[in-house]
Amino acid sequence: FFFALRDRMQNILRRMQAVIGRPASHAVRFGTRIEGAPNTTEFSLFTTDSAGKTISAWHDIPYKTSSPATFNYINEIPKATLAKMEISTKVEHNPIRQDVKKGKLRYFTYDMGTNGIPFNYGMLPQTFEDPNEVHPDTGCVGDADPIDVVELTGAPLDMGGIYQVKVLGCLAMIDEGETDWKLIAINAADPRAAKLDTVADWAKLPGGQEQLDQVVQWFKMYKTTDGKPENSFAFGGQYKDRDYALGIIEEVHHHWQNLLAGKINNKKGWWFPKQ
């Protein structure tokens, strides 16, 4: 099992290394730099600028693009993989690392027959869910992380890749008493993107509603195989539309601005560049 995981991570790393400088849908002014071996606690994937300087994917990449409802997205976990990778919010320059619990690397153990997580998963830069503010629509505080993004198009995206995505809506997951927003988005380079504006549009595509149902099911159940209870959702687990999601994005961007301005107590040690 672990040898198979190692081989899969090595294949992902080869794809990551190949993507540096690729034009396509990546922001070409950014690249990546890898330190450490995969499947170790030393593995780190850093973001670099066009001069090769290490920057923060969380803080230094603009959250917005010039196109309506389109944002820059950092892919942390490629579709159909098992390693729980995420931006390290408390480490200098905020590299992507594998999550560790009690000294052990974390992997998803919940299986929906999709050979790993059934979508691409990552975050929007320059966002933060305030752990001190109760959201009026969920009754819970934020989870103290950048806002999460579920990217629905079929192909696995590169770990650490920066893509422009079109936001279609969102889910409001409640995770151990905290609001954990899940933006629903698609790669703006997908040929269908121009004609899709909302989750309702996606649901009309062949297999679209089944995929949306699968997303809800996965977030509800994925912790249960680790002995934890099911996650719950605000709004009865129903998706909110694009306009609502765009409002949430502006809220969490404002919270990020407050974090950098010192208006949110940094007792947990989140790392950000000196102002």
Image (cartoon, helix red, strand yellow):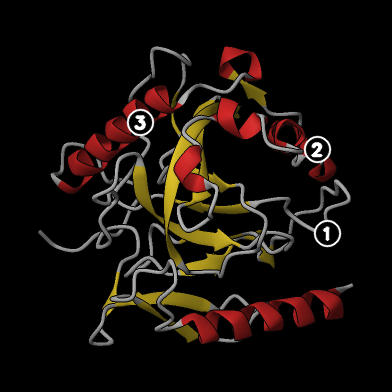
Q: Which residue is mark 2?
A: 224
Quadrant where the N terminus sits is: bottom right
Residue for badge 1: 115
39 and 249: which one is in front?
A: 249
Q: Report if the CB atoms under discs 1 and 2 are less than 8 Å apart.
A: no
Looking at marks 3 and 1 on the same chain, the residue that comes earlier in the sequence is marked by 1
Instruction: Check the image and report above or below for 139 versus 216.
Output: above
The picture places residue 27, in percent across and down from the top left corner, at: 34, 69
Residue under numbered circle 3? 246
For image coordinates 44% across by 83% down, the residue present is: 20
**Badge 1: few (under 14), some or many (20 or more) residues near its Cα, within 10 Å?**
few
Name which of mark 2 and mark 3 comes first in the sequence.
2
Q: Secondary structure at mark 2?
A: helix
Q: Nearer the viewer, mark 2 or mark 3?
A: 3
On the image, the x and y values in percent for residue 176 come to: 60, 29
Q: Is residue 98 above or below residue 32?
A: above
For residue 233, what is the image quadrant? top right
226 relative to 141, above or below? below
**Do we see residue 180 in this rendering?**
no
